[in-house]
Amino acid sequence: MRIADRYIGWQVLYGTIFGVTLLTVVLILGQVFKQIRPLLVEQAVPLDLIGRFVLLILPFSLMFTLPWGFLASTLLSFGRLSSHNELLGLRMAGLSLTRVALPAIMVGAALSGLCWWLTGTAAPIAKEKSRDLLYDAVKADPRALLDPGVMHSRFANRRVYVERKDEEGILYGLHIVEFSSERRDAKVLGYMYSEAVDLYVNAEEKQLRLKLTNPYIERAAKDGELLIVEAGELEPVLIDFSGTRKKRHKPSDITNANIPAAIERSKQEEATLSKELAEGPEDLTQEHLDELVYTVRKEQRRQKELHIELHKRRSISMACLSFAIIGIPLGISARRRETSNGLLLSLLVAATYFGILLFAQKIEEAPESTIVTVLWLPNILCLLLGIWLFRRASFR
């Protein structure tokens, strides 16, 4: 039986490698054109950046191409075994369908373990490094931080917009709006407009020094009055860009090993803020009270997002094993030699599977239990349907 195990196992594995390679190349090319093209065309970044970027997005791409490639390989391999009557010969030798399928199921379980490492360790680290890689390329020319025609939100509590820029680097039509915080309901503290801006870079201090021509400035005073300033020239206006990347990590950027610690920190922060909120509401201003309530809810949202992220990774990691259970009987029932039949089946199953996962991300305002149920629904459906199809195929 070892010969048959190796034969079936290697067929599934070789098909998976071919399918994953093809799908990954297509997916990576799409990401390269989407992420790298603006930097490559507009800022002339070095070509070696593309190679480094491809290596960094490879784990993220494999999260999706590995299950899909394995499913297509399983459907095609067992469809070929069935159509060539090789499966019939093994069954006549006294082997059950479950025993014949064992090598493919073991390959699926091993690939599920690999997916767990990709989704929980390799992909989060690679995503963070890829963002830093692109940011470092931009930071090499800080003037690119104020590209015209783009609403820039990377500066703390500010939104910056530039209408156009000439060949010498002079900016025209600079608009800067300053807010009280990053919240959606933040108050506008000031507005500044300048017809022309000469930009200098202080690399040591990591500051943009702006020389404004014909600036117009509005600023809200403490007493509520509006202060207006107009001048012929104004300098220097400083914008710090050293901390534009110092943001709290998103749940998708945190590895599995660090998620429990992140949840615990969020719970401690929530407890501290809730205690402050409960002990002295009468001593707090309404603005401070609103800020505390907002921050507590933000921490609660973060805990929910971290729990959901963990369940999403577990669900995606189970995809290969689930696809093995449903792909084997589907491949046998096809009983056709044409590869298009297996490819279409794999496309349908994978599209349904990942479509449900995408739907779970769209209902982010739903209760946590509902989102977790939707995340696990594809695996549950694959396992139940696969077991039922297995039983039908076993008694044929």
Image (tube, rainbow, N blue to C red):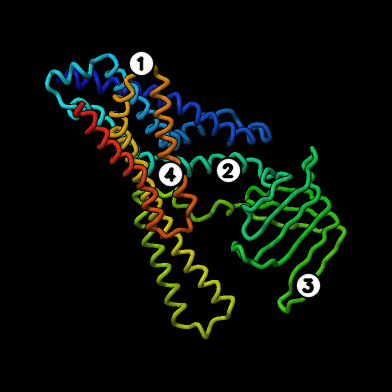
Mark in front: 3 vs 2: 3
Above or below residue 138? Residue 19 is: above
Residue position for label 3? 226
Q: Callout 3: 10 Å neighbours few (<14), some, many (20+)?
A: few
Residue position for label 2? 135
Residue 49 in view: no
Q: Earlier in the sequence, mark 4 or mark 3?
A: 3
For the residues labelled 4 and 3, the Cα–Cα distance comes to: 51 Å
Mark in front: 2 vs 1: 1
For the residues labelled 3 and 2, the Cα–Cα distance comes to: 37 Å
User: At 45% from the left edge and 27% from the top edge, which residue is drawn?
Assistant: 23
Looking at the image, residue 293 sits to the left or right of residue 147; the answer is: left
- Callout 3: helix, strand or loop? strand
For the residues labelled 2 and 4, the Cα–Cα distance comes to: 33 Å
> Given contact means CB atoms under 8 Å apart, are the residues at marks 2 and 4 in contact?
no
Q: Amino acid at mark 4?
A: Ile
Residue position for label 4? 356
